[in-house]
Image (cartoon, grey):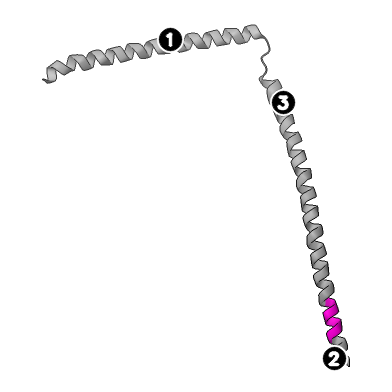
Amino acid sequence: MTDLLQVTALAGAAIALAGGFALGTMFGRKLVADLAAMVHALDSRLSSLESAVHLSAAAPAHPAAVSAQHAAAIEHHAQATEKLAAAIQASAAVASAAKPAAK
């Protein structure tokens, strides 16, 4: 009789353990899902704050200053393009001058 009571007690403990594990797993999943949602919300708020800060910092102070900078950049680019075109023409002239000498 005592063996049957011990086996029954062990079976009851095993069932309680399994039930506790199942409930813990379900609760843990819900807890992790809630925490993930909270972290995602916090991340989206931080991203919007960062983008607002970067946009306000990158905003030009005065449109005329930006236009002047833009014009200077275009002029610089035009000068660099002219130098490149001159270098290409010089290279083509050297290549055409060297071609008859090679024959």
Pick whichever of labels 3 and 1 is earlier in the sequence.
3
Q: Which residue is mark 1?
A: 79
Q: Is residue 3 above or below residue 92?
A: below
Residue 58 at x, y percent in the picture: 66, 20
Q: Report which quarter residue 68 is drawn in.
A: top right
Q: Is residue 11 covered in magenta?
A: yes
Q: Residue at x 83, y 86 (%)?
A: 7
Local secondary structure at mark 3 = helix
Per the model, the C-alpha gap separating discs 3 and 1 is: 36 Å
Q: Do callouts 3 and 1 mark residues in contact (Cβ within 8 Å)?
A: no
Residue type highlighted by circle 3: Val
* Horizontal arrangement in the rendering, residue 3 relative to residue 82 (left or right): right
- What amino acid type should be assigned to the residue bearing mark 1? Gln
The residue under label 3 is 53
Q: Amino acid at mark 2?
A: Asp
Q: Quadrant of the C terminus?
A: top left
Q: Residue at x 77, y 39 (%)?
A: 42
Q: Is residue 36 left or right of residue 3?
A: left
Residue with the mark numbered 2: 3
Q: What's the distance in space between the residues labelled 3 and 2, CA to CA?
A: 73 Å
